[in-house]
Amino acid sequence: MKVFGLLSAAVLLVLSGERAAGSAGFIKSPLSEVRLTGESVALHCEAIGRPMPEIQWWFEADYSNESFSQLWDGAREDRVQMNATYVFHAASTLNLFSLNPEDSGTYECRASNDPDRNHLTKSPRIKWIRSQANVIVLDHPRIKTSSPDGLDGEILMCNLTDPSFQISGHQWLKGLKLVHEDKEDSQITTYNITEVNAESSGQYTCKYLTTILELSGVINVTVPPHVLAYKKSEHGNEGDTGVLTCKSGSFPPVEQWMWYKSSDDGILEPIVNGTEERYLIKSTGNKTELRIHQLDIEKDQGEYICNGSNVLGITGATVALRVRSRLAALWPFLGIVAEVLILVAIIFIYEKRRKPDEAPEDEDGGSAPLKSNAGANHENVRQRNSS
């Protein structure tokens, strides 16, 4: 519908003639907004006319008796940013960042296509048209939170101390996942955790749903790192690249990863990134990876330990690396070939040593001619004919 309206207005302007002027008119006005301190807000305005109108933004504070003052891009210590486009019609967006209570007030979008609109000595024949929106910036209400202090089951709690907000429900989120929701109007909301461990640790957010906006508080459920090896045993061929991986799914994330190699006498030798130009360690948050180039069956085979640490402690996991010889893949094939050769030799020797009387009967005179009684039968037939 919006596109149809724009096209209709454009067609009407074209049909009115090239020299004729069309008064500016709004096709989209800014909407009033309510925000909390520190947040941002965007006001949008669009106008059409012939010639194409210019859009300006003006502001009047709620606490001041002064009249409107014009805003510009970069005002208020660069917290005001404006984006404008003039293609088929005029469109402008006013962005306000890091809001504070002094930003509350009336914001006015003005549009005009009079050629003398910005003349200092002439008054414009066509006045500026105006569209207003109110922006209300509220201080963050205080939400008291309680976080678990042990490993047993705990109840997370948020308490909205400002009673001026009308509450229509609550939501609990773990990260971005919704884990609980209700429609109660209480200022206190709770969420139960049966056990504090690596799986239940994380950042929980309690949200208060109000008629004006959403209010939220954050509770961190923290545990020491829970480090696990992606595979407890890794295998690689000599000369190839071996990859060992460890990860941790607990909160807060691991701050530092360390890799060690266990020697034959049990001493842990730290592995530094780039050592001997064969070791490469890549760590990103809760995952670390050790790459060993040009695997050596004598040097690299053994056990490796990955340790992860955060503010609450340090834990580790062990990965066993097995390095195979390059000829290891040939041994099964060579074993099969050897078995076939041995079997053929046995059959050959058996055939050579077999005794003559063990030969099958069909081989002894099997080709001897058989006696035939065809002649006797012929004589009998002839005798019967002669009688």
Image: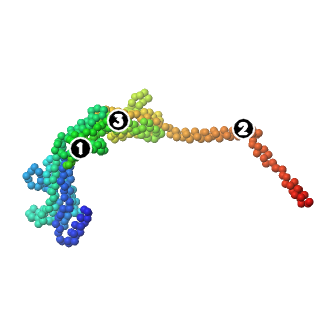
Which of the two labelled residues, at mark 3 and mark 1, occupies the earlier sequence position? Answer: 1
For the point 31% across and 36% down, the residue is 194
**Toward the viewer: 33 or 212?**
212
Instruction: Tell me the number on the disc at residue 98.
Output: none
Residue 62 shown left or right of residue 362 in the figure: left
Residue 273, percent across and down? 36, 38
C-alpha separation, residue under disc 3 versus residue under disc 2: 71 Å
For label 3, count other residues whose C-alpha is less than 10 Å away and answer few (under 14), some (14-19) or many (20+).
many
Instruction: Tell me the number on the disc at residue 353.
Output: 2
Which element type, helix, strand or loop, lies under badge 1?
loop
Callout 3, which amino acid?
Answer: His
Work out whether 377 lies above or below 100: below
Residue 341 shown left or right of residue 293 in the figure: right
For the point 36% across and 38% down, the residue is 247
Residue 285 shown left or right of residue 158 in the figure: right
Callout 1, which amino acid?
Answer: Glu
For the point 28% across and 35% down, the residue is 154
Residue 58, percent across and down? 14, 56
Is the C-beta separation of discs 1 and 2 under 8 Å? no
C-alpha separation, residue under disc 1 versus residue under disc 2: 98 Å
For the point 21% across and 42% down, the residue is 186
**Toward the viewer: 149 or 194?**
194
Residue 18, percent across and down? 20, 71
Q: Quadrant of residue 26?
A: bottom left
Whether residue 256 appears in this view of the structure is: no
Which residue is denoted by mark 1 in the rendering? 184
Q: Quadrant of residue 251?
A: top left
Which residue is denoted by mark 3 in the rendering? 226
Residue 14, percent across and down? 22, 70
